[in-house]
Protein backbone atom coordinates (compact mmCIF):
# COMPACT_ATOMS: atom_id res chain seq x y z
CA UNK A 1 0.00 0.00 0.00
CA UNK A 2 1.48 3.36 -1.05
CA UNK A 3 1.56 6.25 1.43
CA UNK A 4 -0.53 9.22 0.44
CA UNK A 5 1.27 12.45 -0.59
CA UNK A 6 0.05 13.96 2.66
CA UNK A 7 1.72 11.17 4.70
CA UNK A 8 5.04 11.65 2.87
CA UNK A 9 4.97 15.44 3.33
CA UNK A 10 6.04 15.31 7.01
CA UNK A 11 9.35 13.41 6.56
CA UNK A 12 10.18 15.44 3.46
CA UNK A 13 9.62 18.70 5.33
CA UNK A 14 11.79 17.49 8.24
CA UNK A 15 14.58 16.52 5.83
CA UNK A 16 14.39 19.93 4.15
CA UNK A 17 14.61 21.74 7.51
CA UNK A 18 17.60 19.61 8.52
CA UNK A 19 19.36 20.39 5.24
CA UNK A 20 18.77 24.11 5.71
CA UNK A 21 20.21 23.95 9.24
CA UNK A 22 23.32 22.14 8.02
CA UNK A 23 23.81 24.65 5.19
CA UNK A 24 23.29 27.73 7.35
CA UNK A 25 25.38 26.54 10.32
CA UNK A 26 28.86 28.11 10.21
CA UNK A 27 31.74 25.70 9.81
CA UNK A 28 33.91 25.36 12.92
CA UNK A 29 37.07 27.42 12.68
CA UNK A 30 40.36 25.57 12.60
CA UNK A 31 42.64 26.05 15.60
CA UNK A 32 46.04 27.68 16.00
CA UNK A 33 47.97 27.58 19.27
CA UNK A 34 51.10 29.54 20.18
CA UNK A 35 53.07 28.82 23.34
CA UNK A 36 55.83 31.24 24.31
CA UNK A 37 58.55 29.30 26.09
CA UNK A 38 60.20 30.42 29.37
CA UNK A 39 62.54 33.30 28.66
CA UNK A 40 60.18 34.80 26.09
CA UNK A 41 62.49 34.44 23.08
CA UNK A 42 61.03 31.34 21.37
CA UNK A 43 57.47 30.35 20.49
CA UNK A 44 56.13 26.89 19.68
CA UNK A 45 53.24 26.95 17.18
CA UNK A 46 50.63 24.37 16.21
CA UNK A 47 48.29 25.19 13.30
CA UNK A 48 45.53 23.02 11.84
CA UNK A 49 45.23 23.17 8.04
CA UNK A 50 43.14 21.63 5.30
CA UNK A 51 45.27 22.29 2.25
CA UNK A 52 48.23 21.22 0.13
CA UNK A 53 50.34 24.32 0.77
CA UNK A 54 51.24 26.54 3.71
CA UNK A 55 53.17 29.82 3.94
CA UNK A 56 55.13 31.09 6.94
CA UNK A 57 55.17 34.88 6.96
CA UNK A 58 54.57 38.01 9.01
CA UNK A 59 53.51 41.50 7.88
CA UNK A 60 56.32 43.97 7.18
CA UNK A 61 56.33 47.73 7.78
CA UNK A 62 54.32 48.36 4.60
CA UNK A 63 52.06 45.34 5.07
CA UNK A 64 54.11 43.17 2.73
CA UNK A 65 54.62 39.46 3.39
CA UNK A 66 57.97 38.82 5.05
CA UNK A 67 58.92 35.09 5.03
CA UNK A 68 59.56 33.58 8.46
CA UNK A 69 62.54 31.40 9.27
CA UNK A 70 61.08 28.50 11.28
CA UNK A 71 62.72 25.56 13.03
CA UNK A 72 61.71 22.01 14.01
CA UNK A 73 59.03 22.03 11.30
CA UNK A 74 56.70 19.03 11.06
CA UNK A 75 53.55 18.31 9.05
CA UNK A 76 51.53 15.78 11.03
CA UNK A 77 48.72 13.68 9.58
CA UNK A 78 46.48 11.11 11.26
CA UNK A 79 49.23 8.48 10.89
CA UNK A 80 52.17 10.66 11.87
CA UNK A 81 54.65 12.95 10.07
CA UNK A 82 54.13 13.62 6.36
CA UNK A 83 56.86 14.57 3.92
CA UNK A 84 56.76 18.12 2.63
CA UNK A 85 58.72 20.14 0.09
CA UNK A 86 59.87 23.75 0.35
CA UNK A 87 58.95 25.32 -3.00
CA UNK A 88 59.94 28.89 -2.17
CA UNK A 89 61.32 30.63 0.88
CA UNK A 90 58.72 30.28 3.62
CA UNK A 91 56.34 28.13 1.54
CA UNK A 92 55.92 24.37 1.82
CA UNK A 93 53.75 21.90 -0.13
CA UNK A 94 52.43 18.45 0.79
CA UNK A 95 49.65 16.08 -0.36
CA UNK A 96 46.15 17.55 -0.08
CA UNK A 97 44.59 16.72 3.28
CA UNK A 98 44.00 17.63 6.92
CA UNK A 99 47.16 18.24 8.92
CA UNK A 100 48.61 19.88 12.01
CA UNK A 101 51.73 21.91 11.28
CA UNK A 102 54.09 22.42 14.21
CA UNK A 103 57.18 24.61 14.30
CA UNK A 104 59.29 26.97 16.40
CA UNK A 105 59.88 30.63 15.63
CA UNK A 106 61.99 33.29 17.38
CA UNK A 107 60.20 36.00 19.36
CA UNK A 108 61.81 39.45 19.12
CA UNK A 109 61.20 42.35 21.52
CA UNK A 110 58.39 40.44 23.31
CA UNK A 111 56.24 40.89 20.19
CA UNK A 112 54.21 38.08 18.59
CA UNK A 113 52.18 38.40 15.35
CA UNK A 114 50.34 35.84 13.22
CA UNK A 115 48.15 36.36 10.14
CA UNK A 116 45.96 33.74 8.45
CA UNK A 117 44.07 33.49 5.17
CA UNK A 118 40.85 32.52 6.94
CA UNK A 119 39.35 32.73 10.46
CA UNK A 120 40.95 30.62 13.18
CA UNK A 121 40.32 29.95 16.84
CA UNK A 122 43.62 31.26 18.22
CA UNK A 123 45.23 30.70 21.60
CA UNK A 124 48.42 32.31 22.89
CA UNK A 125 49.95 31.03 26.12
CA UNK A 126 52.55 33.09 28.00
CA UNK A 127 54.74 31.51 30.70
CA UNK A 128 54.55 32.63 34.29
CA UNK A 129 56.19 36.01 34.83
CA UNK A 130 54.89 37.57 31.60
CA UNK A 131 51.74 39.63 31.23
CA UNK A 132 49.87 41.88 28.75
CA UNK A 133 47.34 43.68 30.95
CA UNK A 134 49.18 46.97 31.48
CA UNK A 135 48.13 49.04 28.41
CA UNK A 136 51.21 51.27 28.68
CA UNK A 137 53.65 48.45 27.95
CA UNK A 138 51.45 45.53 26.86
CA UNK A 139 49.05 45.05 23.96
CA UNK A 140 46.49 42.55 22.66
CA UNK A 141 44.85 42.92 19.24
CA UNK A 142 41.05 43.44 19.12
CA UNK A 143 38.93 40.44 20.07
CA UNK A 144 41.51 38.87 22.37
CA UNK A 145 40.27 37.69 25.77
CA UNK A 146 42.91 37.55 28.52
CA UNK A 147 42.62 34.99 31.32
CA UNK A 148 44.80 33.22 33.87
CA UNK A 149 45.96 29.75 32.89
CA UNK A 150 47.45 26.89 34.92
CA UNK A 151 50.76 27.24 36.77
CA UNK A 152 50.76 31.03 36.64
CA UNK A 153 50.50 31.24 32.85
CA UNK A 154 48.53 33.90 30.97
CA UNK A 155 46.27 32.89 28.08
CA UNK A 156 44.82 35.05 25.31
CA UNK A 157 42.14 33.65 23.00
CA UNK A 158 40.41 34.87 19.85
CA UNK A 159 37.30 33.28 18.39
CA UNK A 160 37.26 33.18 14.56
CA UNK A 161 40.01 35.73 13.95
CA UNK A 162 42.25 35.97 10.90
CA UNK A 163 45.07 37.74 12.76
CA UNK A 164 46.48 38.18 16.25
CA UNK A 165 49.09 40.44 17.80
CA UNK A 166 50.49 40.37 21.34
CA UNK A 167 53.09 42.50 23.06
CA UNK A 168 53.99 41.12 26.48
CA UNK A 169 56.33 42.23 29.25
CA UNK A 170 58.23 40.92 32.24
CA UNK A 171 57.59 42.09 35.84
CA UNK A 172 60.88 44.03 35.88
CA UNK A 173 59.64 46.26 33.09
CA UNK A 174 56.44 47.06 34.97
CA UNK A 175 58.47 47.86 38.09
CA UNK A 176 60.75 50.08 36.01
CA UNK A 177 57.72 51.87 34.54
CA UNK A 178 56.25 52.43 38.02
CA UNK A 179 59.58 53.70 39.38
CA UNK A 180 60.08 56.00 36.38
CA UNK A 181 56.54 57.35 36.71
CA UNK A 182 56.96 57.95 40.46
CA UNK A 183 60.21 59.85 39.90
CA UNK A 184 58.68 62.09 37.23
CA UNK A 185 55.61 62.72 39.39
CA UNK A 186 57.86 63.73 42.28
CA UNK A 187 59.86 66.05 40.01
CA UNK A 188 56.65 67.60 38.69
CA UNK A 189 55.38 68.24 42.22
CA UNK A 190 58.70 69.82 43.27
CA UNK A 191 58.75 72.10 40.21
CA UNK A 192 55.09 73.11 40.29
CA UNK A 193 54.67 73.55 44.05
CA UNK A 194 56.47 76.96 44.23
CA UNK A 195 54.35 78.17 41.29
CA UNK A 196 51.09 77.33 43.05
CA UNK A 197 52.35 78.83 46.35
CA UNK A 198 53.28 82.13 44.65
CA UNK A 199 50.00 82.19 42.73
CA UNK A 200 48.02 81.68 45.93
CA UNK A 201 49.90 84.51 47.66
CA UNK A 202 49.20 86.75 44.67
CA UNK A 203 45.49 86.02 44.90
CA UNK A 204 45.51 86.99 48.56
Image (cartoon, rainbow, N blue to C red):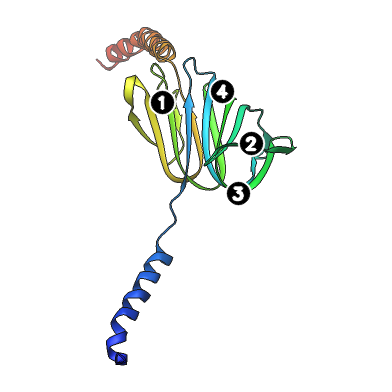
Location of the N terminus (image quadrant)? bottom left
155, 19: nearer the viewer = 19
Location of the C terminus (image quadrant)? top left
CA gap, disc 3 and disc 2: 14 Å
- Determine whether label 1 and label 4 are within 8 Å by CB: no
CA gap, disc 4 and disc 2: 14 Å
Tell me the residue that label 3 is attached to: 51
Residue located 45% across and 30% down the image? 139
- The image shows residue 73 at horizontal and vertical percentages of 61, 30
Label 4 vs 3, first from the N-terminus = 3
Tell me the residue that label 2 is attached to: 56
90, 167: nearer the viewer = 90
Q: Is residue 152 positioned above or below 33 on the image? A: above
Residue located 28% across and 82% down the image? 10
Say the numbered circle drawn on residue 107. 4
Secondary element at image label 2:
loop
Say the numbered circle drawn on residue 132. 1
* Left or right, 95 with reference to 131: right
* Left or right, 134 with reference to 73: left
Secondary element at image label 1:
loop
Label 3 vs 1, first from the N-terminus = 3
- Determine whether label 4 and label 3 are within 8 Å by CB: no
Amino acid sequence: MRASPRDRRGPALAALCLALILISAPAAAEEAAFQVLPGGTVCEASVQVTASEYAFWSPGLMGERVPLQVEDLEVLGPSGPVEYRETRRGIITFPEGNYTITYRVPVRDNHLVAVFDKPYTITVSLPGGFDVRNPLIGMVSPGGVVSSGPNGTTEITWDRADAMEVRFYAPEREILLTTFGTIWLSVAVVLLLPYFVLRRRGDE
